[in-house]
Amino acid sequence: MSTMKAAVLHAPHELSVEEVDVPSIADAGDVLLKVEKTAICGTDLHPYEGRIEIEGGVTLGHEFLGTVVEAGSAVGQVEAGDRAVASCVVNCGHCWTCRRGDPGRCVGSRIFGLGIALGDLAGGQAEYVVVPNADLTLRKLPDDIRSSDEDLLFAGDIMTTGYEAVRRAMQPGDTVAVVGAGPVGLCAAMSAIALGATRTIVLDKVPARLKEAERLGAIPVNADETDPADAVLELTEWRGANVVIDAVGHESALTSACGLLAAGGTLSIPGVYLEEQLTLPFGDLWLKGIKVVTGVANIVSYMDEVIELTEAGKLNPATIISHRMGLSEAAEAYRMFEAHEATKIVLDPRI
Ligand SMILES: [Zn+2]
Ligand SMILES: [Zn+2]
């Protein structure tokens, strides 16, 4: 059996690039993909920092694209030689929630590279990866690809997570406020602009991130310098934002997000919350008639739209990439990412 390079996590902060066996497809719905680009995501820090328990030797990575090497006999949407991007979440496609168009709630959901608790799938920070249920998990990239690989790479995770957070909540002409200008927040801001928001306001405390938001066409608000609620009210004739996106996933961000909402508005939460209870200004939310939409993103439901909009030049998530490195430098890349020395790192498995 031949071997390949893979970024393997053995224990919190113990990551090394090593030679492991090239995986092989086990199920008729599987595809073996040769990885060409893979990114490090904030979620990868959960196993890296020990918040998700890993059991000796997990290949990390759930943002990747590449070329199909081999497709199982039941795969109909891609064949060997096709280029494709993977959803970070693998859904079953036929359970009750999947049938109702809500695959984020699929009880059979698995995520690449997060260990046994999340489905025991080897990740894509490797030269090869097996993609289960490939007809649903993969999207074939157009042959005459107009956008860059680096833009399309994010259709399987952060771009589509940010997009859905806006898409499920926004009407054309709405004002959208995004709390948090990390990768998902910037993708949400990009989506709001592409989908026709009147104003897209981005709140953060890090000047470099706010500058990036401004470059995308959003109105930056530095929460260290201005009261975010006052800033949003002033920009909206004292109404507030119709849609507020909490792209942080921390109680303080949620509290801040609640204060920005217009009456009848929607609070959309792509940020991840694992707390059992949180304190919310519930009387205010009730009086304003606020809708709250939340939960794991429906990646496979929105990937096609995101790819189309990316191909049309309306979404350019590659602009948030700060570093490009070889997979062989993965240990250093994780150190930099954890230390906030990099906003988004793309790894090339061929280097
Ligand atoms: Zn991710
Ligand atoms: Zn399902």
Image (cartoon, rainbow, N blue to C red):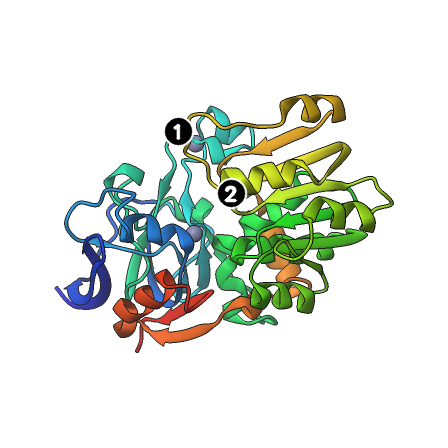
Residue most toward the left? Answer: 1
Residue most toward the bottom? Answer: 351
Q: Would you place residue 55 above or below residue 142 in this image? A: above
Q: Is mark 1 within 8 Å of ligand 2?
A: yes
Which quadrant of the structure image shows residue 84? bottom left
Q: Amino acid at mark 2?
A: Gly
* Residue 284 showing in the rendered view: yes
> Disc 1, disc 2: CB below 8 Å?
no
Q: Is mark 2 within 8 Å of ligand 1?
A: no
Q: Which label belongs to residue 107?
A: 1
* Residue 303 showing in the rendered view: no
Q: Residue at x 44, y 64 (%)?
A: 82
- Number of residues whose C-alpha sits closer than 10 Å to that of mark 2, classed few (under 14), some (14–19) or many (20 or more): many
* 31 or 41, nearer to the observer: 41
Please tell me which of labels 1 and 2 falls first in the chain. Answer: 1
* 222 or 319, nearer to the observer: 222
Which quadrant of the structure image shows residue 6? bottom left
Which quadrant of the structure image shows residue 142? bottom right
Q: Is residue 239 left or right of residue 91?
A: right
